[in-house]
Image (tube, helix red, strand yellow):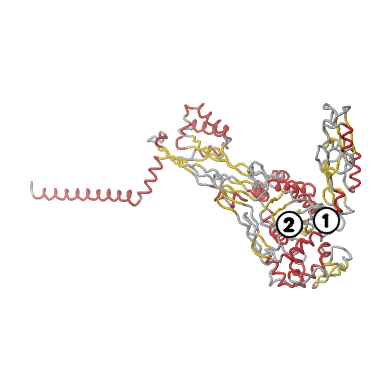
Amino acid sequence: MNTRSKKNLRIRATIALYILLFAFVVCVGSLVRVGLIHGEEYKLKAEKNQLLDTKITAERGTIYDSNMNVLAKSASAWLVYIIPSKISDDTQRNLVVEALVSTIGADEESVRAKTEKESNYVKIAGEVEEDRKNALQSFIKEHKDAKLNEIIGIDPDTKRYYPYSSFASSIIGFVNSDDIGTNGIESTYNAELTGVSGRIVTAKNARQKKMSSEYEMTYEAQQGENLVLTIDEVIQYYLEQSLDQALVDTGAKYAYGIVMDVDTGAILGMTSKPDFDLNSPNAISNQLVAQRIAEILDEEERSKETLNAKFAQWRNRTISDTYEPGSVFKTIVVSAALEENIVSLDTKFTCVGGIQVANHYQKCWKPGGHGTQTLTQGLMNSCNPFFITIGQRLGKENFFKYFEAFGFTEKTGIDLPAEANPVANVTYHSLESMGIAELSSSSFGQTFQVSPVQMITAVSAIANGGKLMQPYVVDSILDSDNNVIKKTTPVVKRQVISEKTASTVAGMMEQVVSIGTGKNAYVAGYHVAGKTGTSEKIGKEGAYIASFAGFAPANNPKISILVAIDEPVGAHGGGVVAAPIAGEILEKILTYLNIEPQYEDSEMKSISSTTPSLVGKTVAQARSSAQGYVIKVVGSGGEVVSQSPAADSQIRSGGVIVLYTEETAEKQTAVVPDFTNMTMSQANSTAVNAGFNIRFAGTTNASEVACYKQSVAANTEAELGSVITVYFRSTVNVQDA
């Protein structure tokens, strides 16, 4: 080999060596990039192709009322998903769509779009119930040749149930499709209720099929914590029942109410009407609103109005809305004035029908004025000029000191979302901006706004001896075995007024209910204390909010109540509209709580008596045992086999007892009279003459009262001897604005 050939060979060898060296460097670089730089990324991709990781939704914690009645609970359900990447052709795709639409009710257009995705997992539906899951499995089995079981998957899931539908809906809230709390307790305590999700990790073979169970690992889900609310199911029912009826009776836009334990701040009942079905929160519950929206032709506008209607029905107005409290706020002003020794029970003021405030003459609601009044009479009569004078004597510094102390410049801190935030010079007058006009109008509850929960918390401070409490709705948190892991301790935010002042104002408020503007909230035997309010809505002339706030029993307060009727049609005064509703609710709640009534001598005339047990007696013996009652005998037997009303029923002396002496005797009925606008004596005699018994409710301690409602509708058939509750109220001297 010559020299030239040897040289060429060396050159070729060198080039080959460089090529090999370069290839080696590239390979090493790739190994470094794959193994070190992107190692974790490729590892995860490999695992993703080799493993099927399925989430197991944790069962959400249960929500109970204070008596451990279930208000919200999760139950087993199923999650349906597909693996679109395994769909081989349009025939198989059409069969998948048919399966999901016909068995679980999935939307055809949505499902078809999901089948066209390049993915190994697409969720179709959660919270699928057992019967639908079984139908889907049957479809898959019937079409086993299509291998749908390799495309459609079914995993364990949970579904949230609300046994009482709309009951306490504004408090409880609901969960969305991802099991995340929306509104109410479900939102505030979402972290506690949610729990920890589990996983099922399954190995897949090279054909992307699940391997046997020996290659499967399950990590169990951990159930969420349970909540026990302060809400009492019975009290909540009474509150909701009365406010539902109030919407019908008054034609109001909204009605809301709160019942609170005055000593602890625990919310025993809270509602905002109209409400919604927790099991179908996206359905518009108000049929009139739903119909109006359905008639909107523009799709974008219809969608917007639908969304607004949803938010409106979800809104808890007792904590999220603000309103001018009106004359209810006079209880706060008189508390401040007594505490500062600006006034005493002996203070007198002569109302001539109005008072000059700067360049404005503020009229009293009573033409010609109230004349000379004591402090208690001024509160009983809800006299605006009197309270303007008290406010001016207090001065803006003292006024604002107590306005702030009673909690009106801050949130209450209640454990519910979306509480209204007080804003200086927006919802209330700051000290710096308060002039004589603002001070005067604020002194009778106008030109500023508070939330209902702020107002009842302040009134409760008067009831409990002067302590401002922090309201709350969750009493305790339990683990999955219902062991208490956290208990709410009542929080005293501060002492606002002395026990002496609180007791004095409570006595004045009792007079308001017994003979003043709040007389329609009167409940015989229970010494209710309270104050009515009527306020015109800011920026909406002719629209009013009628309200009542108070507590009972006045001499040993246990519960406080606030009722507000928003935009009633026709009568709009708190004394006529809200007070009777509050009285009706209080009577039911106080009886339920087994608080013993203490009747005055003057109240005994309206008290019902207990019917004797007459079954088994001869007719003669029955007549002897039931002296003082009107006895009607049905049948020709010699012995009483049944009676109406039953033994131990509450009826008035002189009422009717029907005795049946034959087992086969047909029940005797009659037409129920219309007691509307009758006095108590007229209603009683009319009932007895018609063969019925009557029970008095509402205001029974005033001479000018008239019936406005009855428990059994007029002109309907009812069994003779039935007990009909007749409600009375007064329209005389109950104005407060």
- The x, y position of residue 579, in whole percent, is 79, 54
Q: Secondary structure at mark 2?
A: loop
Q: Nearer the viewer, residue 412 or 528?
A: 528
Give the image quarter of residue 471.
bottom right
1 vs 2, front mark: 2
**Which residue is located at x 65 percent, y 46 percent?**
67
**Label 1, label 2: how far apart the Cα atoms are:** 18 Å
Instruction: Give the farthest residue toward the left.
Output: 2
- The x, y position of residue 486, in whole percent, is 56, 52
Left or right, 126 with respect to 727, comes to: left
The residue beneath circle 1 is 519
Give the image quarter of residue 694.
top right
- The x, y position of residue 8, in whole percent, is 14, 49
Residue 232 position (above or below residue 640) = below
Q: Nearer the viewer, residue 530 or 161?
A: 530
Residue 276 position (above or below residue 534) = above
The residue type indicated by label 1 comes to Lys
The mark total stands at 2
Residue 355 position (above or below residue 104) = below
**Which residue is located at x 84 percent, y 48 percent?**
607
The residue type indicated by label 2 comes to Pro
Q: Which of the image's four quarters has the C terminus? A: bottom right
Residue 635 position (above or below residue 418) = above
The residue beneath circle 2 is 557
